[in-house]
Amino acid sequence: MPEPSELLVVGSIALDTREGPYGRVREELGGSAVYFALAASLIMPVKLCAPVGRDAEWPARHALAGRPIDTAGLEVLDAPTYRWNARQEHGRNVDLGSSDRIYDEWHPRLPEGFAGWAFVGSMRPDRQAEAMRGLHHRARLLAADAMLSYVKSQPPEAKDVLGRASWFFCNEEEFAALGGANPEQFRREWWLDGLVVKSGAGGITSQTADGRLHVPALPQHPAFDTTGAGDAVAGGMLARWLSTGGQRNGLRDAMVCGVACASLTIEAIGIRGIASATPRLLEQRMAEVWEWLRPES
């Protein structure tokens, strides 16, 4: 029988071409599964399920090696790895287009006997929904994330994903594009146990039946490259919450961990910040978030 503390991420592996205050980077390793797994693995073991082309197999395996990340679900295909182009403006990424043909050939192969917590990261919505159908009766908590370009280009499919989630993560623009105005009303309308709205420099806010919780971002560390911050939030938050028992009174602590993981991520280009972080460094960053949070409490 599987342990109830298992954590799974199903998501993307990407080669990003981006430009911003840091200059221009080409074919930088990224993707929702990579950022989530690197953040979560600072706290507990995590299983990964994602497609990658042969053109990025070695960088992906190298980035995930040395951490408690089970890559048995990493499927190597002949199709080109998912590509994403973006430009960072005022601390946020403007999507300039992507190439997602790999999803035409990939179908999620979920770990046999899995019965823990699962996060389905941003990728093409039909593959998100497919993963969620397979996890519906197996995952004790099923969370998903949104991606603005897909919400706008494939709204029915994006809403199908939303309708299958028990916890949903999105930024303010994605929330608005999905028809959100009042977070509690939106949570009730979609029968969500929890909604997490990410506000960049404004931090994160959760909405549950117990009410609203807010954790601010850390202003004293640089927001050098904001790519992957949202996936790091989810990875840190869900791993911390699960590892401490998943009780309702542990949610704020879990959110603090998510914000700390995002802070570690954005202070370097691509995955460098979160990939070089250690559990001790995460503890120190969490302490800073708690200190910054204290005036709000």
Image (spheres, rainbow, N blue to C red):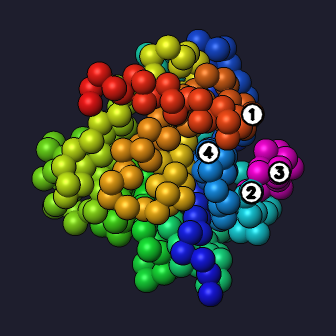
- The answer to whether marks 4 and 3 mark residues whose Cβ atoms lie closer than 8 Å is no
- The answer to whether marks 3 and 1 mark residues whose Cβ atoms lie closer than 8 Å is no
In the shown orientation, is residue 195 left or right of residue 75? left
Q: Which mark is residue 65?
A: 3
Pointer 1 residue:
276
What is the residue that sits farthest to the bottom in this orientation? 1
Element carrying mark 1: helix
Pointer 4 residue:
39
Q: Is residue 37 above or below residue 176?
A: below
Write down the quadrant of residue 83 in the picture.
top right
- The answer to whether marks 4 and 2 mark residues whose Cβ atoms lie closer than 8 Å is no
Determine the residue positioned at 42% across, 68% down: 141
Determine the residue positioned at 14% across, 44% down: 182
Question: Does residue 238 appear in this view?
Answer: no
N-term-proximal mark, 1 vs 4: 4
Q: What's the distance in space between the residues labelled 3 and 1, CA to CA?
A: 12 Å
In the shown orientation, is residue 219 left or right of residue 188? right
Element carrying mark 2: loop
Q: What's the distance in space between the residues labelled 3 and 2, CA to CA?
A: 8 Å
Residue 172, given in percent of the width and then of the height, sits at 30, 36
* Amino acid type indicated by mark 1: Ser
Observer-nearest of 83 and 23 = 23
N-term-proximal mark, 4 vs 3: 4
Dot 2, crowdedness within 10 Å: few (<14), some or many (≥20)?
some
N-term-proximal mark, 1 vs 2: 2
Q: What's the distance in space between the residues labelled 1 and 2, CA to CA?
A: 14 Å
Q: What's the distance in space between the residues labelled 4 and 3, CA to CA?
A: 13 Å
Residue 191, given in percent of the width and then of the height, sits at 22, 66
Dot 4, crowdedness within 10 Å: few (<14), some or many (≥20)?
many
